[in-house]
Image (cartoon, rainbow, N blue to C red):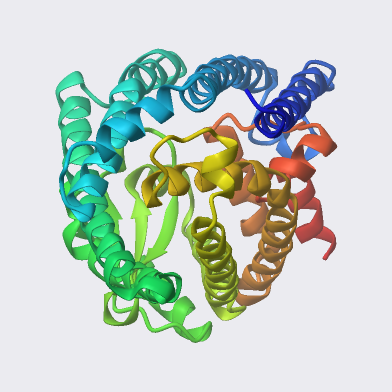
Amino acid sequence: MGKELTFILFIYLIISAFDYTLAYMNVRSLKRAPASVPEEFEKTADRDFLARARRYFLENFIFAVTDSLFYKALIILFLFTGAFNAYNSWIESTGLSFIIKGLVFFLLIFCVKFILEIPLNYYRTFRIEDTFGFNASTMGLWLLDLLKSFLISMAVLAAVVLAVLYMVEKSHGFWWLWIWLFAAFFSVFMIYVSPYVIEPLFNRFTPLEDPALSEGLKDLAARAGIRVTKVFKMDASRRTRHTNAYFTGIGRTKRIVLYDTLLRGLSRAEVLAIVAHEAGHWKKKHILKQIVLSGAVTLAVLYISFRLFRSSLLTGIFDIDAPGFFSNAVIMGFLLSMVMGPARVLFNYISRKREREADLFASRLTGDRGAMISSLVKLSVDNLSNLHPHPLYAFFNYSHPPVLERIRYIRDG
């Protein structure tokens, strides 16, 4: 192993060690948290909630660390021991066309990853989620979802790989620009078709049975400047007892979707507050800003990749015998994961700022701060949220402010 490759491995291990240190600090913070229920939760939760939330958090922590260590070990073994070089050389020696070789190259990696995730997915669903009363899925439904996810993911990945490799083969010096344009178009296309094609494959969407609530939600969206023609209830309770609500679609496909689990536990005012929060993201153009930011980052990454791929820098460092686009893409993806880890600090900071703006917007739109606060309290209790994350862990990893911080910000804002 050369000096450069050893240095990259060292940095990867340092970043990983830092992440695990933050996670450990988060566990210690929870264990040292007050045993009493915060005053904001006194009317809804008791000490039993704190105990169950702590156990749920610790179960997920152990699972997440085990999962992470497993995948990091596989990545190191694959990239730093010659296994990746052997795999790449085998693909390059098949004599297939560039596009077909690429299709086989990436689909095989995806299939191995998908298979490795099956036991982990099973354990999370039928051990952790089931133990704490969140899982409502049967084995048959879980297997069916697994099969659907595999087939859809394979189809989408194949389409994307074929399109990208065609552009690389045909456009030569400008494939980075064509791929960027394709990515932008494809993202919008998926947002448009997902409510009609993909989402109904997993859940049943029926018009909201409460006409007063439906009209109230449409009126709320209209006051936020959003035209919503349909409000749906999703049968989430077939799989989970977690709660959620969201906007989906674009243009005429834009709709409000409420989990049936959400409707069972929240009042009308609280449901309106949650949807008003989502409307706030649209009104404040958070989604548009995110698309622009993501597009700019993607364009920069693609151009840098193009410049690096034209040299032998990446494949030379990793001692690749048959360098090409596929091996460069995998190495670049690995290096980006290292860079984007620290970069998430900035992205999470921006996200938390936008969540606060959406919270305040929702409170002002509904004129009911109490409903916004009580909805956050109920959602936190229903989902056994950690009320006492370590500030440093939250700073690096939370895309939303900690719930107690959100509640106090709404109350005092």
Please state if 5 lies on the left or on the right of 84 as rendered: right
Q: Nearer the viewer, residue 250 or 307?
A: 307
Q: Nearer the viewer, residue 395 or 297?
A: 297
Residue at 64% across / 49% down in the picture? Answer: 340
Is 409 rendered above or below residue 40?
below
Q: Nearer the viewer, residue 80 or 110?
A: 80
Q: How many marks?
A: 0
Where is residue 273? Give x, y as percent: 56, 62
Is 66 rendered above or below residue 388?
above
- In which quadrant will I find the C terminus? bottom right
Please state if 233 lies on the left or on the right of 332 as rendered: left
Camera sees residue 404: yes
- In which quadrant will I find the N terminus? top right
Residue at 58% across / 29% down in the picture? Answer: 384
Residue at 78% across / 15% down in the picture? Answer: 31
Where is residue 20? Give x, y as percent: 71, 23
Residue at 68% across / 50% down in the picture? Answer: 344
Is 168 rendered above or below residue 100?
below
Where is residue 242? Give x, y as percent: 43, 36
Where is residue 343? Give x, y as percent: 71, 52
Is 289 rendered above or below residue 203?
below
